[in-house]
Structure formats: C-alpha cells, structure tokens
Image (cartoon, helix red, strand yellow):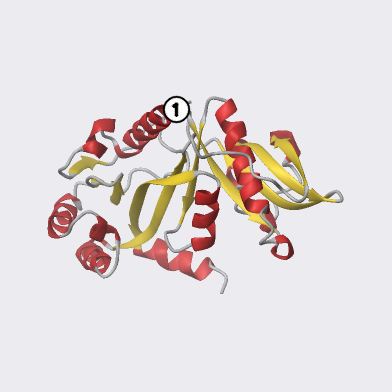
C-alpha cells in the first residue's frame, strides 16, 4: 500500500459519498452535485444531504438538495476555500440556510496514514489484538469512541491495552465502507498521558493495512489531543468536511451532550 494508492482510494470513497468523480476534488473551481444515496458511501452517512461541503484543499465539492443549491453556490462564491469552513464566515452560511430550517452541524478533519511515517509505537502495557467476537461485553460508555453500539456489525478489529488483565485502553475500527476502516480510540482517564493512545492507534493502523484496507481517522478541528495523537502515529490531514442538518436535529443533539 503506497501513499498514492491510499489517496486514490480516499478520493474514490469521497466521490461515492458526494455523488461526483474523484477528479472533482482536484479541480480549481468548486463543484456542486445533487446529493443522493449510494450503496458504496460511508454507512453512517444519512444521505441525501441538504448541504455538505468537502475539500481536499484545492476547491470545495458541495452536495446539496435542489432547494439549497443556489444558496450554497452563492455562499461558495463569497470566500476562499479555507474560509468557507470557518467562523465568522460559517455564520453567513447559517443565515443563508435558515429559510430551509437548516443549520451547520458538524465540521471535521479527516486524516490518512503516511506509510513513510507510520510505525508501531511502544506501549507501557500488554497489547492484544481483538476481533468482533471479543467486543460483545465492551459496548460501554468508556469505550464509546472505539466501538459503536448502534452499528456493532461494522466493528471488525481492535487493539486493547491491559494492566494486569484490566482493559485500560481500546482502539477499534469500523468497516464504514468497502476499502476504508475508521479508527476510534479511548483510554481510561487515570491511564492517559502515557502513550497508550498512540501505541494502540499505530498498531491498529498497521493491522488494517495488512488487510489491504485504508485506515482513516477523524476529529473535530479543535480537538487538539486527538489531532496530536493522529499526527504522532504518522497520520496527516487529508480532507475537511462541513455538514448542515435540520435545526431540530441540531437542537436535540446539543441537548444530548453531557456538560
């Protein structure tokens, strides 16, 4: 698996997700598409979207509904690529989407491994490779990033760190699409800052590559701890994404968050 192949696979996956061609992400001009469901899209995406912006750094590929297309087109004409994903400009997008009862909901940075930098990092505790049958009793709040209870069937591989038999850290991957597995990581609070997260993440990424799949990693742009973990393990930022959702969904989501 080379870096070039990894990028090709990621671009193709984004094309499935956004109803476009892989080459569209490499153009200088923005591309607008009609959002539709695709059998090869990431399984957790609630397609179709009303407004979803993706950029690999050159331009923005925006998938929209028919009713929001012109508003999104106008928004993208106002700002350079990077500013289209950040405040205060995102507030302008919120105002333009308000008549459609929509609001910006999620923003994220996605990372891909650099095979020239990815390496297994040391762990101060025993590490074990885990498989789907090992996860049955691990769908607990403390492992909510590593495993997804709503999509148990997609949790296919993991690496755990054990202190005298006690699970203290867990990296898991979800087969979110045919060729790419997403990594999530949890470490118990009292065991953090010991290098466990990076050891588990790097080991799991290597195990995923052995399966001829591409590991990818996602974090909010402001989650510095998670971003540092990705970079330490040999991942690099590859693309960014911004998604608007129904205002009622956003409000309910905010209520569900723990303070």
Q: Residue at x 18, y 50 (%)?
A: 69
Residue at the far right: name it: 164
Crowding at label 1, few (<14), some or many (≥20) Cα neighbours within 10 Å? few
Q: Position of residue 4 (x, y in %)?
A: 38, 29
Image quarter for residue 259?
Answer: bottom right
Residue 152 appears in the picture as rendered = no
Q: Is 155 on the left or on the right of 244, as rendered? A: right
Which residue is label 1 attached to? 2
Residue at the far front: name it: 116
Q: Residue at x 16, y 56 (%)?
A: 71
Q: Position of residue 192 (x, y in %)?
A: 68, 61
Q: Please tell me which residue lies in front, 251 or 213.
A: 213
Q: Please tell me which residue lies in front, 64 or 188.
A: 188
Q: Please tell me which residue lies in front, 185 or 151.
A: 185
Q: Residue at x 47, y 64 (%)?
A: 253
Determine the secondary structure under disc 1: loop
Residue 26 appears in the picture as rendered = yes
Q: Is 158 on the left or on the right of 58, as rendered? A: right
Q: Position of residue 37 (x, y in %)?
A: 35, 36
Residue at the far bottom: name it: 259
Q: Please tell me which residue lies in front, 42 or 65.
A: 42
Q: Position of residue 234 (x, y in %)?
A: 51, 44
Q: Total number of numbered labels?
A: 1
Q: Is 189 on the left or on the right of 166, as rendered? A: left
């Amino acid at each position: 698996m080379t870096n070039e192949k990894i990028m090709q696979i990621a671009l193709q996956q984004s094309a499935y997700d956004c109803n476009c061609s892989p080459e569209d992400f490499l153009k200088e001009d923005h591309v607008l598409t009609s959002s539709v469901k695709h059998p090869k899209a990431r399984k957790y995406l609630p397609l179709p979207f009303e407004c979803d912006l993706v950029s690999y750094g050159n331009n923005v590929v925006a998938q929209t509904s028919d009713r929001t297309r012109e508003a999104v087109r106008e928004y993208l004409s106002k700002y350079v690529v990077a500013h289209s994903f950040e405040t205060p400009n995102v507030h302008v997008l919120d105002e333009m989407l308000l008549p459609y009862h929509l609001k910006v909901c999620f923003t994220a940075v996605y990372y891909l491994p650099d095979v020239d930098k990815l390496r297994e990092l040391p762990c101060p505790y025993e590490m074990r490779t885990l498989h789907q049958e090992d996860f049955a009793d691990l769908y607990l709040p403390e492992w909510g990033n590593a495993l997804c209870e709503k999509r148990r069937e997609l949790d296919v591989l993991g690496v755990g760190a054990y202190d005298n038999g006690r699970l203290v850290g867990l990296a898991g991957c979800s087969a979110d699409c045919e060729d790419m597995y997403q990594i999530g990581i949890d470490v118990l609070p009292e065991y953090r800052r010991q290098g466990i997260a990076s050891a588990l993440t790097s080991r799991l990424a290597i195990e995923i590559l052995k399966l001829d799949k591409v590991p990818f990693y996602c974090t909010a742009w402001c989650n510095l701890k998670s971003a540092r973990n990705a970079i330490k393990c040999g991942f690099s930022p590859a693309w960014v994404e911004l998604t608007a959702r129904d205002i009622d969904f956003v409000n309910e989501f905010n209520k569900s968050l723990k303070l």
